[in-house]
Image (cartoon, rainbow, N blue to C red):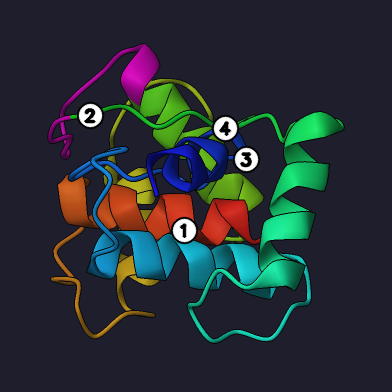
Amino acid sequence: MREIQRDLISAGFSLPQFGADGMFGSETERAVMRFQKRYNLAVDGLVGPQTLGTLKEVNNGDRPVNEFPLPRGVLQNGDEGNSVKQVQRALKRLGYDPEYIDGKYGSLTEDAVKRFQSMYQELANDGIYGPNTKRFMEMELEDL
């Protein structure tokens, strides 16, 4: 199981909570399902022969590169810096253009975050970038 988890991580499907712990829990199942969805496999959350074969192919070929690494922590209106730029670039790529990629978390960036958050019932629609918003943004970026 650890090897499969490592392969998922290498293929760009993070397991931020537990990592490659050798346990097939809900986090690993979700990563498997996202992998299956991206590679047009039956989305059942099981690591059968097709999923395993595709996972090996992906890791032996060109690995996906995360072009939009997202920062940890909490960012909100008034914050500035490279972390804000990372969020702004990712928002633009996801179709929630904050208009400027200037590293300043102002009302336009806050609005773009709110528009993204409004797509998910699980997220507070508060315009604040935090761990939950990061998780959903990463999930969407992985599907592009």
Instruction: Name the residue type under label 1.
Output: Met
Give the structural element (helix, strand or loop) at label 4. Answer: helix
Q: Quadrant of residue 118?
A: bottom left
What residue sits 65% from the left and 74% below the top? 37
Give the structural element (helix, strand or loop) at label 2. Answer: loop
Q: Say which residue label 3 marks.
A: 11
Task: List x then y, in percent, for residue 59.
Answer: 73, 35
Residue 81: say if magenta.
yes
Instruction: Name the residue type under label 2.
Output: Arg
Q: Which mark is residue 139?
A: 1
Q: Say which residue label 2 marks.
A: 72
Q: Say which residue label 4 marks.
A: 10
What residue sits 35% from the left and 59% below the top? 28
Q: Nearer the viewer, mark 2 or mark 4?
A: 4
Give the structural element (helix, strand or loop) at label 1. Answer: helix
N-term-proximal mark, 1 vs 2: 2
- Cα separation between marks 3 and 2: 21 Å
